[in-house]
Image: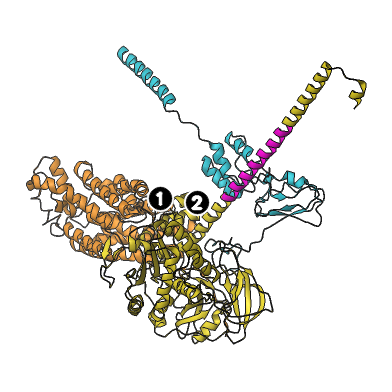
Amino acid sequence: MLIAVVTLLVLGLLIGLGLGWAAVRFRVESDPVIDQIDAVLPQTQCGQCGYPGCRPYAEAIASDEADINQCPPGGEAGIRALADLLGREPKPLNPENGEEQPATVAVIDEQACIGCTLCIQACPVDAIVGAAKLMHTVIEQECTGCDLCLPPCPVDCIAMVIPDQDGTVWAWPEPGRPAAGGVQ
Amino acid sequence: MKRQAFKTSQAPHIPSTATVGQVMRQVLYALIPGILLQIVFFGPGVLVQIALATGFALGFEALMLRMRERSIARFLGDGSAVVTAVLFALCIPPLAPWWISAVAMLMAIVVAKHLYGGLGQNVFNPAMIGYVVVLISFPKYLTRWQAPADLSTHSLSLNETLAAILHGALPVGVSWDSITQATPLDTLKTGMHAGESLPEIMLSPVFGQFGGMGWEWVAAAYLAGGLYLLARRIITWQVPVSALGVVAAVTLPFWLLDPVTHVSPAQHLFSGALMLGAFFIATDPVSGCTSNLGRLWFGLGVGLITLVIRQWGGYPDGVAFAVLLMNMAAPLIDRYTRPRAYGT
Amino acid sequence: MSVPHDAGAPGGRLLHRLRGGLRLRHHKQVSCARPVERPALPDVLIVPLQQHLGLPAQALVQAGDRVLKGQRLGEVDCSGGVSVHAPTSGTVRAIEHRPMSHPSGRSGPCVVIEPDGQDRWCEPSPVTDWQTRQPRDLLDALCAAGVVGLGGAVFPTHQKASLGRVRGTRTLLLNGAECEPYISCDEMLMREEPHRVIEGARVLQRACGAEHVILAIEDQMGAVFDALQQAVGEATDIELVKVPAIYPEGGERQLIQVLTGQEVPADGLPADLGILVQNVGTAAAVADAVIRGRPLIERYVTVTGHGVVEPRNLLALIGTPVSHLVHHCGGYRGDADRLVVGGPMMGFTLRSDSEPVVKASNCLLVLSADDLRAPQPEMPCIRCGECARVCPAGLLPQQLQWQVRTGQWEAAADHHLRACIECGCCDFVCPSHIPLAAWFRHGKGQLKAQARERAAADHARERFDARAARVERQKQEKRERLAAKKKALRERSAAKKKTPVSTEEVRR
């Protein structure tokens, strides 16, 4: 009986020591999960999630502060991708942050623009060209549709429009459904 | 002369004629020779079992389709439930009570098929699930095999067969003992365990020229049906060839070395449900592997496990268990035998 | 697995076996029985400004202009596309949006021309002494002549050849292996004008630098082989090869695998293997553009199917309404039900026959109700594996359809959905009648859209980070300037304390 107890004790000690050593020797560096989350987010930098940009939101998700369903520009596809990445259940988009809208771009009404540069300073991706007292204009290819230029404009001359579909963005729809962007 | 309003559709635009129902029907046609020979040797009981099992299977299928709000017309006619029922009916003794079919079809259609998602979604072969459940739950009824016609003291007529199946009643003067007999595989197993040598065991009248008496011809008929399915490209050669091949390959050297204590490959191949299993049961596309290489491994596993159970297991034949065990392994085998895509 | 195959020339090439594929009924005899004809001028020609892969051409003419045959109607920078030309002389009626024979049925900017009946050519601009000119000159001529891949992909030929030249092309492969049923335009071109094809091969050879040429045709094209053999003559660097008529052996990647045993890498191009593939019709257009100075304004079109009275091949002007071609072929049969541009396996349907023939229109297939697939109810997949057996790309369609249906895009990309060539073989054999080809077309489009979005998001992130860095740098510079000013001020006041100054100096 005593031998059994001693044997088990010794075994337990040895195995415990072995595990402890293995935990140190074979430690895996934690994945740069924040970078991975940021890679999935749409980079609109709009702030609708409640965080000042996509990277802070990624950091909040990684530290479990924020849920994965806060991003309207990412939409359902984005939530699904985040759920896959983090091994969680996908959920519907939180309606408090906004709804999933079709992609838009900003357009400045050149007649009304007064050249104040407030929108240029507000744009997070430098998509507006212009200078003080000179015409401002939005470069359509660079605009991410984040809406951040609308509030600062003192004459309210910026509108969000759906960009022209004339071009190559048509894609085959799911079988049995009508196409988006086509006639059929 | 312009025509403005043509209908639109997506490519491909030309007709192809394959249907699920067609595949299932070919399988049923291929079973006919085996069924006929079974009637010749063992009486009309098998037809009654087929009728019962088919009836129960279709009934449960209709019930489940209604409960799952699927189109009964579309799915009832695809023949998959009928194939399940017929394959099950061929695995059980022809005089098994009617409620055996009922219980088995309940397990097969409701649990193994529909609770897993219906056609195309079942992980396990439904017929084998049904068979294994009743085998384990009601062993007495599932081991009461009739003696072949030449050996039996009394051949039951159709009416007597019906009475036996539906009521469990045998004609006056006939007892279960007098019409049933151990199967060839059963005889082999009990004999080997008792330490008898093979030549002694093989003296028993249950053995025919190359397999069990009567049973060898039924198995040969299944082989013919299986070759028909191969020719019509309903099944691929990988599963039958690997299953039968491994059985032959493993038993051959042992038998050549010592025919006194080891059963011959022919005896193994034509006994029990191996032919039926290799061509009709293990080739079930839904619960088997999808890639051809995967199918080779699948067949190999079925053959090996059957041999192991026959040699050392508690049951005389192991095809059903082998198939179910390999069903479990199929997704893993599929994962590791994915074909190489072009350019990768 | 290789099959020794006598190509009719000494030292026959060893062919490799195509993975999967189907033997389909050809239906080509009837459209090859009649000689090729040029239909009369139609009442109107609708010439889309985008008939190629890339950016649309910008119109150079406006409504009311008179144009000559072959005159440039629209152009775009050679890195974005090719030019578009007037198919006949006449007046520009309008430049407006019209349906332009696109699978979506959408409209695009088109130049609508009213022919004047005179069919007057403008001045041709051949490349003089093309055999000794720089490849760059030949490629520029191809761009200016609007030459694109006429096998159906309409990729600008000069871009493909230029890429081939840059990556080092050793073999020019001319694709005459028209494998889709019903289509016979390439066969008739090779039978009636083989010398144009061979001339085009020579020009392409010079343009891309290939050492030798392989011309592949199907083994059921009997008369074609002799005609081509005559046109090739004594040349030793052009090899004529017959490939078995299995669909889709005529696909670019499949043809390369069958002829050379090499596979184009999944994320690569044939140029990576030193091979440039061109359709035989494209080669003929190349010859016209460089040697005769004529732009691409017409092409061979097969008009066939049970829904048309006299199936045949036509040499049709680009921009001809489809109805005009059908009329030339005797009109519709009573039970004509569907108008397909392309073949029965990969073609798309047109809603109306007023849509024009464009550079991509190789065949007009008028199917009767009997020819078509009756819509069958879709059953669940029974994992029979037939689709995987016939897939020429070695994919697992039953897995892919499950993944595409449920939006598992990463898993679909992992199972190489991008390698799907949309041939439709899997769809054709499926006993459950699952619309596999449609699912995979949709899935591939989704993957492309996601890649585009990811690229746009990465680009936006770079700009955001750059802007943040710039703002930070400006703040830093401001701080430094402020600190330097403060320091200078401190030094000046310290210096002043040491040296006494007069009141006037301080006030200054």
Are the residues tagged 2 and 1 within 8 Å (C-beta)? no
**In the rendered picture, chain A carries what hue?**
cyan
Q: Colour of chain B?
A: orange
Numbered circle sitting on residue B227 = none
Which residue is at 35% across, 60% downward?
Answer: C389
Q: Which residue is mark 2?
A: C409
Q: Which residues are magenta?
A: C455-478
Q: Quadrant of residue B211?
A: bottom left
Residue B157 in the image, given as x and y percentages of width and height: 21, 63
Residue at 61% of width from left, 71% of height from top?
Answer: C74
Q: Is residue A12 magenta?
A: no
Asked whether residue B78 is in view, the answer is no
Q: Position of residue C19 (x, y in %)?
A: 34, 61
Q: Farthest residue toward the top?
A: A2
Looking at the rendered image, the disc whose residue lies closer to the viewer, 2 or 1, is 2
Pick the front one: B152 or B202: B202
Mark 1 falls on what kind of element? Answer: helix
Indicate the position of residue A158 as horizontal and vertical percent values. Answer: 76, 53
User: Which color mode does the image show?
Assistant: by chain
